[in-house]
Structure formats: C-alpha cells, structure tokens
Amino acid sequence: MNSRDRVIRAIKFLGPDRIPTCKFNPLKGDILPILILPPAGWQPPEGYFPYDIEPEIISFGLWKPKEKLPKNWRRTRYRAYDIWGNLWEVDGAVTYNGQVIAGALEKGWDQLDRYTMPDSRDPFRYKMFGVYRKLLGAGRYRMVIGRNFIFTLFHYIRGFEQAMMDLVEFPDKVDRLLDKFTDYFIGMVEMCGKRGVDGILFNDDHGTQQGLIIGRKLFQRFFMDRYKKVVDKTHEMGMHFILHSCGNIGGIVEDLVDMGIDALQLDSPNQTGIDFLADNFGGKIAFFNVVDIQTVFPKGSPKEIEEYARKMIKRLGSYNGGLVATTYPSLYAIGADTRRERIMFAAYEREYN
C-alpha cells in the first residue's frame, strides 16, 4: 500500500494499514502539499512585502517581488497587501498570520461593481503542479493548499464587524459578493482537478472558543448552498474536499457532513470535543487532526502528547479509517518545536507496530 492509497483509504473508511501522516512538508509524510501561485504579473499595490505568499514560492523564484526582500523578512514587522486587495499587519517575530487592518471593500458597497477578483483560472498559477507531481509526488497523496474560503474572505474584505452587520442589513449585497467567491473557487477546483490533484484543503474558521461566530441559521442561509456547490464540483473532478476550521464548530458539523465534505482538519480538537465528534460523527467524516495546539502540543509532557494521539486513534480513527495525523505548519508560532512533533508522530507509528 503506497501513501496515496493509505490516505484515500483513511478518508473513505476502507482500512489503511496505518494512520497516514500530513507533515506539510514537500519531502516528508504521506501527503504532498501543493501550492498555488499568485496571478501572473501580480504585485502588491504598495511596498514590496507580499502577504499570503508561502516563502517557498519566493525561495524557488516562482514569484518575484519588484524589490529584493531583506533577509528573514518573514520574521519582521510589516504591512502588506494580499491578492484580494486587503491590507495586513504582520508581526513575523510572533506569528506569520497577522490580521487584516483594511478590507478591500471596507469603505462601502458602492465599490462592489468595480471590484476585480483574482483570476482562479489563470494557468500560470498552476504551472508547477506537474513538476511537483513528477519530482515529489510518486505514490503520495497530492493535496492543494487552497487557502482562505468563502466566509473568511467575506469578513476580511468587508471588515469583521461590518461583515457581521451586513448579513442582516444588506443580504442582497452579501449574496452578490459570495456568488463571486463561489465562482472563484469553482474555477480553482476545475483547474486543480485537471492536473491530477487528489484533494484540496480550504481554510474557513467558523468558531470561537465557546461556539459559532455566526448562528447556524445564518450559516445555512448564506454559506451552506455555496459550500455544497464547491464540494460537488470537487467530487465531480475526482477530488476530496477537506475543510480546516478553528474554534468550537459543533453547531454546524452536521451540516458539513450533510453537504458531503470529506474531512475536517482541526488544530484544536478540544474546542469542539473529541468525544462529541466521535459520538456523533465517527465513521461519517474523516479528520485531519493535530494534537491540540492550545494545550497539549505546546505545553504537554511527552506522555500527555502520546496519550492524546492514542485517544484520537481510538475515538476518531477506529472506523476502518477516519484519521490522518497532521502537524501545525508554524511550530514556533504556538510555542512548539520539532522535538514535540517527532514525539507526536512516533506515538501514531507505535500504535501500528
């Protein structure tokens, strides 16, 4: 059984020979992460710090800023625009993530008609897929990092507080914007599907520490049908749809299962609850999980990390599959390190030896 078969069997509950691993590393693990490039010719409108572009893309010369970036630029403090026109402030000494300080459409809905979306069907953005597959993808599951999805883009572009009010005050405007996003992602899915991809991982955080950011009814009204269109297109193109979502998302997991999402990627399973997920959805949807990054992974003892991994195998991965062991891409941002990562993955391996 090769790595690709192992991951597919875990997602489809068909009996993998062990827990597959996703290390977000082009050289390691059962999953090969594949990056989408910025649009051809794109440059930030101000400055030269590109936000939301993986360092590997710059290191390999796949996209070049107008001016040379200083050494260790990712770990400095800076402001930068993303491809959507949002202005970010990032303190790279603390985290790569940062926050939006000015959304592209934050000043008003009158900008909507003039707003230009990035082109998800630009072939340039996928030009490296064949190279990834030939050089690094032999026998591995090929997973595209699809970045931020519909809900996240919505509140980035409008500003969080305004976006929450928009759902009630300007539903027609919201519908128009979300339809544009949906078309963008359908285009992305089509381009990936034509290039031999196995699955796409999208990011859309729906939870706080306690519960959902927006109520379930609002999620169903604005996002469920649009999610399903993209999920259905993903399946039509022969791929899996994998959703990363932070926070306690227990209130919508049933909806995510009903719309056909293949797997959930959870960095903090404790927020929703391993037992809740297992009791209600075990065997119905797969999980790409990390040992909880808020508590156990950065702070726990080696024994606690191992016990947490075993619990996820027992509760989420004992349905003839159902679990893929993942890591967190920026260990330093959560106070973890490669030693803890090795302990975590070794715990999964021991359960199958």
Image (tube, grey):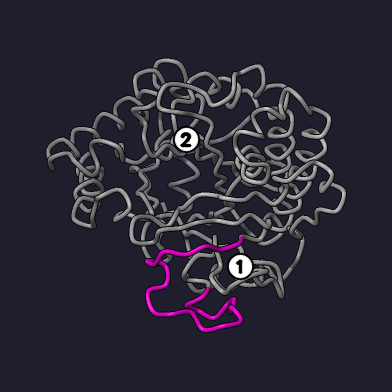
Whether the magenta-drawn stretch holds residue 60 is answered as yes
Residue 275, percent across and down?
34, 19
Residue 88, percent across and down?
55, 56
Residue 341, percent across and down?
25, 51
Q: Are marks 1 and 2 in contact (CB under 8 Å)?
A: no
Left or right: 271 with respect to 306? right
> Seen from this angle, which residue lies furthest front?
107
Residue plotted at (59% across, 43% down)? 240
Q: Quadrant of residue 203?
A: top right
Q: Residues within 10 Å of mark 1 (few under 14, many from 20)?
A: some
55 or 87, which is in the foreground?
A: 87
- Residue beneath label 1, please? 129
- Residue beneath label 2, please? 14
Q: Is residue 56 above or below residue 227?
A: below
Q: Is residue 199 visible?
A: no
Left or right: 337 with respect to 155? left
Secondary structure of residue under mark 1: helix
Whether the magenta-drawn stretch holds residue 203 is answered as no
Residue plotted at (50% across, 36% down)? 245
Label 1 or label 2, whichever comes before in sequence order: 2
Q: Which residues are magenta?
A: 58-81
276 or 158, which is in the foreground?
A: 158
Secondary structure of residue under mark 2: loop
350 or 296, which is in the foreground?
A: 296
Q: Is residue 294 visible?
A: yes
The number of discs equals 2
